[in-house]
Structures are given as C-alpha cells and as structure tokens.
Image (cartoon, rainbow, N blue to C red):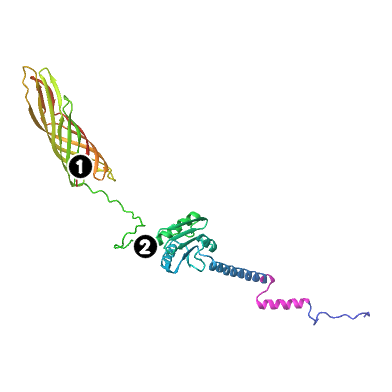
Amino acid sequence: MARGTPRRDISRATRPGRTQRWRAGLSRRKRAGLSRPRDLRAAARALGVAATLALTLLSSRAAAETEAPVVAIVSGPADASTASRIESELKDMGITAQTLILGGDAPAGEPLSAIGERLRVAAAIRIGADRSIEVWAAGDPAVEAVAANGPSDDGDRLIAIATAELVRARLLDTGPDPAPAVEPPAEEPPATAAPTPSVLEARAEPAPRHSRIAAEAGPAVLASGLDLAPTFNAFLAVAVFVVKPLSLELFGAAPIVPARTENGAGSMRMHTALFGGGLRLGLESGSGRIAGYAAPGFAALFLALDGDAVDGYEARSETVATAAPILRLAASIRLASRLRLGLEALAGVALSEVAVRLGGREAARVGRPILGAALCLEVVLW
C-alpha cells in the first residue's frame, strides 16, 4: 500500500452541515402547516388587507360621527316647541336637522349667514324672539323671512310646514337635494279650528246646478208663407225642468211690425202671432259653457188682417187662427252663472193654409211654411 495521507470516511459524519440544518427547518415548517415560503407570503398579504379594511371602517365611522348637520335651527329656550316641529318636518322630507340654543354655538347678535358658514351647513334657520323666522342657504346670501301668526297649536304646525318647504326650495335652488324627499300625508285641520289668515285655502267651485225654471226673451222675425215679407216680433219662452235632460216649455211671439201688401183695390197689413208649448231636450258640454236644445211642440198661429180700400171697395178687419206643429232648435253660450245668450231657429207648417184676397183677387197664401229666428237672452230664475 502506498504511503501518504490516510483517507477519511465521510459517509458517517456526525457534525451537522448545511443540508441537515435545512432539513431540520423544513421539518419544523411542516409541523406548523407551512410547507413552502410562498404560503408565508400569502398569509402576510391577507393580514395586511384585513388591517387596511379595519382602519377604513374606523375612519369612516369617525367621520360620520363628526360630520356637521345639513340644516341648523337656531332658537331660544322659549321656542323649543316650534324648533322641534320644524326639525320633524325636515326629517320627514329626508333632510337632517339639528337645533342650537342661542348663546352657545350661535351668539344672539351674530348674523345668520355667519352662523351657517361657520358651522358649514347647507342651510340655517333662526327663530326670533317675536316668532319671526329667517332662512339662509349656502351659496345664496339672501335671507328670507316666513310670516308668523299668533301662538297656537295650528299656527306652530303651519309655520313649521311653511319653513320646511322654504328650506327645501332654497336647497333645490342652490344645489342637489340632499336626500329623496317623501311627502307626508296631508293633515286635515280640525272641524272646529278657526281659519288661519296666512294660509290660502283652495276651494273647488261647485258644479252649476241644473236650472229648474228658466226664461228667455229677445227679438225675432217670423215668416208665414213665402208670399209676404216676414214680420218683426218679440219672442218669449219659459222652461220648467222635469228630469234631466227633459223640460216642459211654453213659448210665444208677439207682433210688433206687420207685413204689408197691396194691389189696385187697396192695401193690407198682417200681424202674425204665435203661442204654443212643447217638450225640450237639452244638451250641454262637459263644462256647461256651451249648451243647446231641440224642442218639438204644437202652436196656434194667429193672423190679424186689416187694411185700407180705394174708392168703390170696403175695408174690414179679420183675425184667423190655425194650428201648426213646430220644431225649435237653439244653441247658447254661458255669460254668467245664471245668464246665457242664445240663437234660435223655428220651423213649422200650418194645418190649414190661409188665402188673403184684395178686391176679389188672391194677394197671398199664409201658413205654409212657418219660419222664424230669434236672438234670446236666457235667465235662470231658480
């Protein structure tokens, strides 16, 4: 065997080296449930995220607790009831409010705008010693006043409603609505409460009652046949309501200016009168401003004849009557609650035609047809 340095058996080294130390550390990590360094990094990242969320929630809560109110109500101790009502009305509209007592955060002589800017609120309300109320909104230097009534429960409630509405309007003018407003249900005042002068009550005008008795009158022209010119008459009618839309009516036409005709034997004047009755069927628009009716009926036609004769002829007077079915149509417009202006048309035919003779010769035939028109003013009597 050659001589030299003796060889050393390293297969059973007892001194722990780097490999053994790494294996020992790996065994400890396995026992702890962390087999890789990557798991350590993931756990550290999760702990960082949780800490960040906790800090964010705590800071948000602290900011919410220290945030200033949206609306500040400045009042004295004697006006606590009014301030409480205003605060309640604002909260019903979704607006946060806080009441401040004069002398602390709100000195008595400090302007309302200065108080609002110092407190950094969107609006400020001040209740004065004389129950006057002032409203200020951020972004608008103007201060508006709310009219106040005498001290009463209804007066405080109405003042609170008016003040809350004014604040809401000012906030809408100067910026977005802080929260969606929910309108409270309207409260009906007690039946025994006296009306408040500062509140305007809207009263619906009652629908006009259907007339029971109505009368109409006006000038008319009436033609009896086609051979003579029409006569000028005064028309009159009275209607009595029975059941909607039916009425009973009486009508008549009194003569004023006659119709004339003449020939070689002389001249003739004819006065025409009409008197009758019928059933009226009324119609009207939804508002009642425009109305109309159709009225079928019967009438008596009266013809009063007189004249002048030339030499050799004798003049005499005579009155003739005949019956005639009549149809009247009318349209009217309302001028006032009890007054209407209408235009009417009349048509009919006499059951017996009347022949008028002068000196033995026929001068005209009267009664077929009967035509007329009238401009009438209708008055509701009851």
The disc labelled 2 sits on which kind of residue? Answer: Gly
Q: What residue lies at 35% left-to-right and 63% top-to-bottom?
A: 154
Q: Residue furthest bottom?
A: 14
Q: For numbered disc 1, what is the local secondary structure?
A: strand
Q: For numbered disc 2, what is the local secondary structure?
A: loop
Q: Which mark is residue 281?
A: 1
In this rendering, the answer to whether 263 lies above or below 177 is: above
Name the side, left or right, on which 151 lies relative to 55: left
Magenta stretch holds residue 290: no
In this rendering, the answer to whether 90 lies above or below 247 is: below
The image shows residue 312 at horizontal and vertical percentages of: 5, 17
In this rendering, the answer to whether 109 lies above or below 286 is: below
Of the pair 296 and 288, the residue shown nearer to us: 288
The disc labelled 1 sits on which kind of residue? Answer: Leu
Circle 1 residues within 10 Å: few <14, some 14–19, many ≥20: some
Q: Quadrant of the N terminus?
A: bottom right
Structural distance between the alpha carbons of marks 2 and 1: 56 Å
In this rendering, the answer to whether 288 lies above or below 29 is: above
Sequence-earlier tag: 2 or 1: 2
Residues drawn in magenta: 18-39
Indicate which label's residue lies in the foreground, 2 or 1.
2
Tell me how many marks there are.
Answer: 2
Q: What residue lies at 67% left-to-right and 76% top-to-bottom?
A: 30
